[in-house]
Amino acid sequence: MARPRLRSELVLGCRDPEVLARFWCEVLDFVVLDREEGCIEIGPREGFGGPQPTIILSRRDEPEPGKSRLHIDINATDRDQDAELERLLELGARPADVGQTGEEPWHVLADPEGNEFCLLKARLDPL
């Protein structure tokens, strides 16, 4: 039986899709793939249908209540964690406190709208 070919996407509700599209395109080296009223889809430069999911930034006037159960982990493969942390902070990320001890091998950050994500210690060989 043939394996199904799937296209995956993550949807993130936000107040300003343009601001978050710029931020996440810089962080992930993504490009804008599509725009519809109130939504911007970003993804790999190769376009739709590859192994990486795309991200849809969907305009919401109010954030959804409660803590999000999904967050993005990123892992730099061409620089060390400290250099990547500096780059992310320059792009507009800020440290986020979720109760970590300071002994973790990752950093918890928030994007310009406060969505949490983690910068992992390098686990992959540089590309």
Image (cartoon, rainbow, N blue to C red):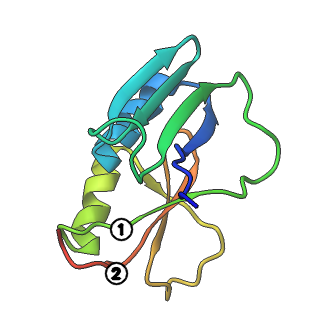
> Residue 123: which numbered mark, if any?
2
How much space separates mark 1 and mark 2, taking CA atoms?
A: 7 Å
Instruction: Work out whether mark 1 precedes mark 2 in sequence or the reverse, and give the earlier one.
Output: 1
| Vertical placement of residue 114 versus 3, above or below | above
Residue 76 placement (x, y as % from top left):
28, 66
Q: Mark 1 points at which residue?
A: 75
| Vertical placement of residue 77 versus 90, above or below | below
How packed mark 1 is, by other alpha carbons closer than 10 Å (few <14, some 14-19, many 20 or more), is some
CB contact under 8 Å: marks 1 and 2: yes
Dot 2 amino acid type:
Arg
Q: Nearer the viewer, residue 98 or 5?
A: 5
| Vertical placement of residue 62 versus 26, above or below | above
The image shows a total of numbered marks equal to: 2
Residue 112 visible: no
> Residue 46: which numbered mark, if any?
none
On the rendered structure, is 33 left or right of 70?
left
Q: Which of 4 and 46 is in front in this view?
A: 4
- Locate residue 85: give its quadrant: bottom left
Q: Nearer the viewer, residue 72 or 8?
A: 8
| Vertical placement of residue 81 versus 4, above or below | below
Give the residue furthest to the front. 1
Q: Residue at x 49, y 24 (%)?
A: 40
Residue 112 placement (x, y as % from top left):
48, 40
User: Element type at marker 1?
Assistant: loop
- Locate residue 13: give its quadrant: top right
Dot 1 amino acid type:
Asn
Q: Residue at x 51, y 48 (%)?
A: 5
How packed mark 2 is, by other alpha carbons closer than 10 Å (few <14, some 14-19, many 20 or more), is few
On the rendered structure, is 17 left or right of 98?
left
